[in-house]
Image: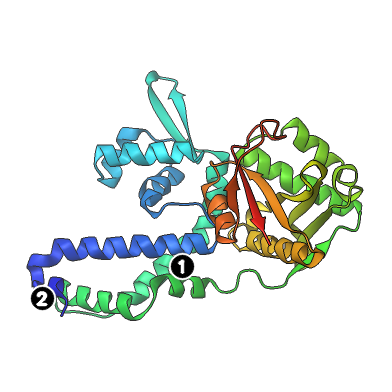
Amino acid sequence: MDALQGFGELGLGSRLKRISEHLMKEGQLIYDHFEIDFDPYLFPVFKLISQKDGITNTEIFNAVGLTQPAVTQSIHKLTKKGLIELIDDDSDKRRKIIHLSPKGKTLLKQLQPIWKSIDSVIKSFGMETSSSLISHLNSFEHKLKTHSFSKSVIKSLGNRHHSIQISTFQNSEAEKTAFYDLNEEWLRTFFYVEPFDEEVLSNPDKYIIDKGGHIFFTKLNGEIVGTVALMPLPKQNTFELTKMAVSPKHRGQKIGQQLMQYCLDFAKNLGLPNLILYSSRKLENAIYIYRKYGFVEIPVEPDCHYKRCDIKMEIVF
């Protein structure tokens, strides 16, 4: 017996809270499935900002009806993730005008088809007519219990990575250009291009291939949409999993995970004892994926060649 359901109208507030928490949890499963670093609780504020050509904190508060601390917290988290920019108001320097950042605009493109599917699935779950709000909630919660909401959304989006092929570096100009462009775009979106990055990206033969390393590409219907490299680290007697990047319009299709698994299988077949990678704790979703595949944190050496690096990870085969 569902106690809250038995309380009838008296349990309405608690039931709505339970449904909300369930949908937030399922929403996070959807974003995680498509490798998208987004918090469902940030949706109303992020969505509103994306619809406006500049908006203030107060305007967000009045529009969404959340508490001021909740709005402030959302803005702080979105700023920390680099998804929004706060710009001084020309007419009043005390005010900040909030816009999506370039990174936020890229993320928005990834989120829109997912939001469309979420909207469609919720509508299908709530199609039945009822004589009262409580009976409608009974029907809606029954759907949530008997049909996985997250799996329904993922299924409705279909297999978004069909026709994916992974190939090795053939030293063509097209591959060199793709290797540079994909990584350069990714670095500028999340960080900046460091001198060491520029050297490696401009000279993949010198720093990777000629030293016994490997570069791989993912192709979707013949178009290069992702890349990754295994770069030799002679001083550490191992390879670095590095320079993984996916085209902005194809992120969220698990291409990165396919590249990751391919590299792990390739390394095992070579008989390598381990692989290491360097990253930044800023990339929370990426760190989660690395841990999922078996990487564990190890100390970062003082002379690490990446300024942005504050975490080093290793997987032992």
Q: Amino acid at mark 2?
A: Gly
Which quadrant of the structure image shows residue 218? bottom right
**Tag in front: 2 or 1:** 2
**Looking at the picture, how far across and down is residue 115, in whole percent?**
45, 61
Q: Secondary structure at mark 2?
A: helix
**In the image: residue 101, left or right of residue 225:** left
**Looking at the picture, how far across and down is residue 127, in whole percent?**
31, 77
Name the residue at 72% across, 45% down. 183
**Looking at the picture, how far across and down is residue 171, in whole percent?**
91, 54
Q: In this orientation, which residue lies closer to the viewer: 14 or 140?
A: 14
Q: Amino acid at mark 1?
A: Ser
Name the residue at 15% across, 80% down. 1
Write down the residue under mark 2.
6
Q: Note whether 108 is above or below 271 in the view shown.
A: above
How far is mark 2 from mark 1, CA to CA?
32 Å
Write down the residue under mark 1.
117
**Looking at the picture, how far across and down is residue 66, in whole percent?**
26, 45
* Residue 62 appears in the rendering: yes
Q: Note whether 29 is above or below 136 in the view shown.
A: above
The chosen color scheme is: rainbow
